[in-house]
Image: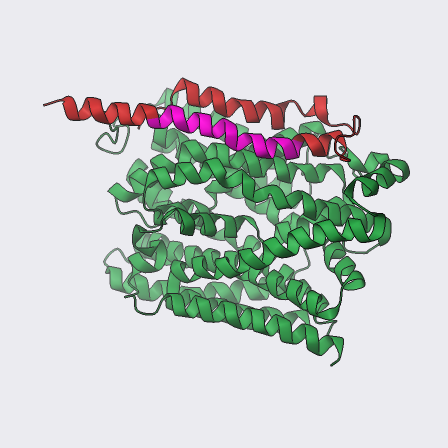
Chain colours: A green, B red
Amino acid sequence: MSPTVVALTIISIIVATGSFIGLYAGTRRKMDLEQWIVGDRGFGMLLVWLLTAGEIYTTFTFLGASGWAYSKGGPVLYILAYQALMNVVAFFVLPPVWEISRKYRLQTQADFFQVRYNNKYLSAFVALVGIVFIVPYLQLQLTGLGMIVEVASYGAIHRTPAMILAFLIVAAFVLTSGIRGVAWVSVLKDILLLFSAIFVGVAIPYIYFGGIGKMFTELVRVKPAHLTMPGATTNLGHTWYISTVLLVAVGFYMWPQFFGASFSAKSGDTLRRNAVIMPFYSITMPLMFFVGLAATLILPGLPNGDLSMLAIVRKTFPPWFLGWIGGAGALTAMVPAGVMILTAATLFAKNLCRTILFPKMTDQEVGRLAKISVLVITVAALSAAIYSSTTLVGLLLVGYGGVGQFFPGVVLGIYSKRVSMPGVFAGIVTGVLIFVPLMLTKNDPIMGLNAGFIALCCNFAVVAAVSILKPAKRGGFGESLDRNA
Amino acid sequence: MHRPSTGAILFALIPFTAICFSVALWDRINPIVFGLPFNFFWLITWLLLTPVCMWGAYRQETARISGAHRAGSAKP
């Protein structure tokens, strides 16, 4: 058999198994909106762990981490930093969010803003901003998936048909099984990915240099500046590191899909314990860095750093292993994409259409509209991915700068009674209005700081100023949620 | 909502300080530890120590919550 056929067979088997699990997970359950979007709020620690962990290992970490280690060097360390610290933030933010979600039967992030600030325009605006920033993240998954399948099939499958096929499958299991389907597909994906990451990360330095330590000895000799910040860049120094780590650590769970995934947990304590152990899961990330660093010595001058991991695997291992990586990589894009599509569709149907346009819609009609929106959003992201050529990292940072602006509204909403609706509304508008122009004019980082972080600081200042000048008349959630009350 | 306890917040500040704010102190190659440049070694170590700190924070929070529950149920 030719290498192409071998690799293609393995990719197809893995993707088919994943699709079967995804479709099967939803059978025997009645798929109303509640089951579809929050899994009837019955997920225990294992499924919550799989769902959140499945989200963390997206295509960006799979390709982007080794890609940054390859093309940027030291600044890639920010990934390890935020993956530890975002869970520290989650420890304090997610359990109260969960309690509110249980009490008020919340299904989306925009619902949270609705019950806390009691203003339908704010909640619709939050939904709109969420959808707008999910699309580039979804596009990132698609583009990554296209690259993986193209390289892993030795060019036999062009990236466009690969993206279309994979996303039809994702749309299918999202429609039939909702969030439960996504959680179960990530079981397969995580097993494949953990094995691949550990094996590749240990084997590549060993095969070419005789070990990880020896690889670093060589790197220190040849290009020591690559190993510390700013590495191969001029503007990603220590202030950039601190501002980016802070933005991403607080911004991560502000993604509507991660925020919403916490609603599916069985209890607030599940989320708290999950936040404690989560950093262990990132222990395979450094291995991805090692692969990228090895590639700087073995395959210098690649046009696209995001391809360094795949290029070195193709050079080193037999076709079946490349197929394995290709299949795992495809699922890595499909799992997070599933949750994003699900979330964006629900935000669109429930928090935009019903809230603003058709307040008389019933829950059944919202559910039906959400399922139609799944197809619309899939097609939108597909066309964006096919016709645009932005890099993976560029796409990701656009998203964090945007959704990070929800943080003041969420955290002050939980812990402060004085924060006011106009303050939060003005803060988010300010943050987005500062961030988007800086991003579009390529002024990120600006003055050595992450542009999204600057926008977030201004956002906080506006929330505080407006809330102090015109304090909220009735703080909190209408009634106290304090367990002591 | 009840505010997190001071103890839990102090536990949480440890990883933030070690991983984020102190970057200028540890972002260097030497000394090499276990074959890794010092910055890589430092962050990998803190990836393992962060759950230890947060376990401390967890103990603080759960002790307080169960205490609050007992106090709550004692009320008429």
> Image check: A340 left or right of A248?
left
Q: Residue at x 79, y 50 (%)?
A: A206
Q: Position of residue A80 (x, y in %)?
A: 63, 38
Residue B59 within the segment the image draws in magenta: yes
Depicted A58 relative to depicted A13: above or below? above
Q: Nearer the viewer, residue A47 or A116?
A: A47
In the displayed image of the protein, which residue is found farthest to the bottom? A1
> Image check: A443 left or right of A277?
right
In the displayed image of the protein, which residue is found farthest to the right? A222
Q: Position of residue A435 (x, y in %)?
A: 58, 39
Residue B6 within the segment the image draws in magenta: no
Q: Residue at x 63, y 29 (%)?
A: A242
Q: Position of residue A239 (x, y in %)?
A: 68, 27
In the displayed image of the protein, which residue is found farthest to the left? B76
Quarter placement of the N terminus of chain A: bottom right
Depicted B52 relative to depicted A177: above or below? above
Q: Is residue A333 visible?
A: yes
Query: Does the magenta stretch mainly form a helix, a strand or a loop?
Result: helix
Q: Position of residue A431 (x, y in %)?
A: 52, 36
Q: Is residue A70 visible?
A: no
> Image check: A222 left or right of B52?
right
Quarter placement of the C terminus of chain A: top left
Depicted A345 relative to depicted A434: above or below? below
Depicted A92 relative to depicted A358: above or below? above
Q: How many marks?
A: 0
Range of residues picked out in magenta: B43-62
Q: Residue at x 71, y 25 (%)?
A: B26
Q: Nearer the viewer, residue A374 or A214?
A: A214
Q: Nearer the viewer, residue A154 or A160?
A: A154
